[in-house]
Structure formats: structure tokens, C-alpha cells
Amino acid sequence: MNELDSETSDPVLLDALSTAALVRYSRCFTSGIRARLSIEELPTATAEDIELHERLRGIRDWHIAHPINKQEVHALYVILDGSPEAKTGAIGFSSFSSVQLPLEKFQVDAMLALCEKWVSWLNTQLIRAQEPLIPVANGLSREELLALPQDEPQPNSNIKARRTQVQR
């Protein structure tokens, strides 16, 4: 955020930060191993939130994931010998590439507000999912609770195991 406020902000850093933010935001809305979220699930989403969400997803899809779009300009120039005694055509080449920064400060602020709504809603969903477990846990003795597996969650690199987890 400080980089956006700076008058001497680095465009490469801003692009990298915007890209990272868009990829991380969009990740939970794409298909894959995890359960997929949908903007329609967020009860507090306003029409503006939905429009922003679609814009953010569009930037991610068409600017980052599939970067062939109107926000990118690439050109190759041929340098011609313009002297009267020129015997050849081209004496060199030059190239130009330009990419518009995908997010402006007001969009970053709006994205952060939308993310806060998602976090609040997801926390509510987690609490609701845990509520049925409380009576079960209360029905166990201290010894039974302590006998439950206490291993730290491990990353799952086995694709078959990951598919099994999703199918539960």
C-alpha cells in the first residue's frame, strides 16, 4: 500500500505486487483440489463488490494467466539507413514493450475491503461447521481427547491422496 502512495513508485514493483495480489485473490475461485468459492455465496456482496470481483478475475484471467490483451503492447522496429548514399535497407532493430499496471490505488482499496468481507464470511462458515463438533468433543473424556492424533498437518504431495480428500 505504501508503494501506491509514493510519488516515486517503482512501476515494476507495483506490477509485481498487483500480480501477486490478483493471483492470490483469484486462487480460491478457480477449480482444482480445494473447494471453490463463488461470489454468489457471499451474502454481504453488493452490486459494486460483484462488479469489482468480476473485474479482478478478468484482469487475472486476461492480463496475468493468458497475457494476450489490449493492456499489452509489443512492437519491433526496423532502423533504416536514411543517408543519401545508403546501399542497404535495415541497419538495426529496436523493440518496445509496455504493459499497463492492472490495479490502481482505488481498486486495491476496494479489493482489500472485499477480501475483508470474504474473511468475515469464511470465519462465520468455519464456526458453523465446528458447532456440531462441540457436543461430540464434550462427550469425550479428557483421556480420550488427549488420545486423539495430534500431528501437525502435513503438505500432501500425493495427487491420489489429494483427490481422495476432495471426494470426502
Image: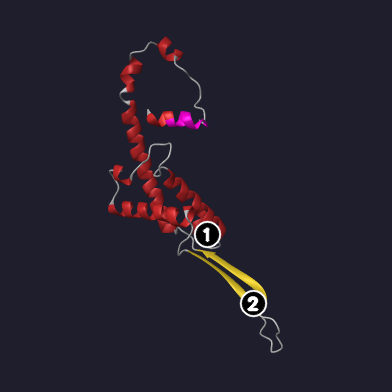
Q: Position of residue 73 (x, y in %)?
A: 51, 66
- Does the stretch in magenta take in 158? yes
Q: Which residue is mark 1?
A: 6
Amino acid type shown at disc 2: Ile
Q: Quadrant of residue 9?
A: bottom right
* Sequence-earlier tag: 2 or 1: 1
Chief secondary structure of the magenta span? Answer: helix
Place of residue 135 in the rendered image (x, y in percent of width and height, measured from the top left): 31, 18
Q: Give the residue type at disc 1.
A: Ser
What's the magenta region? 157-163
- Badge 1 marks a residue whose secondary structure is loop
Disc tally is 2
Whether residue 1 can be seen here: no
> Which quadrant would the C terminus be assigned to in this image?
top left
Query: Mark 1 Cα within 10 Å, few/some/many (few <14, many 20+)?
Result: few
From the viewer's side, name the closer residue of 24 and 84.
Answer: 84
Please give the residue where the numbered disc 2 appears in the rendered image: 79
For disc 2, the neighbor class at 10 Å (few under 14, some 14 to 19, many from 20) is few
| Residue depicted at x 63% and y 71% | 94
Of residues 14 and 1, the one drawn nearer to the viewer in this rendering: 14
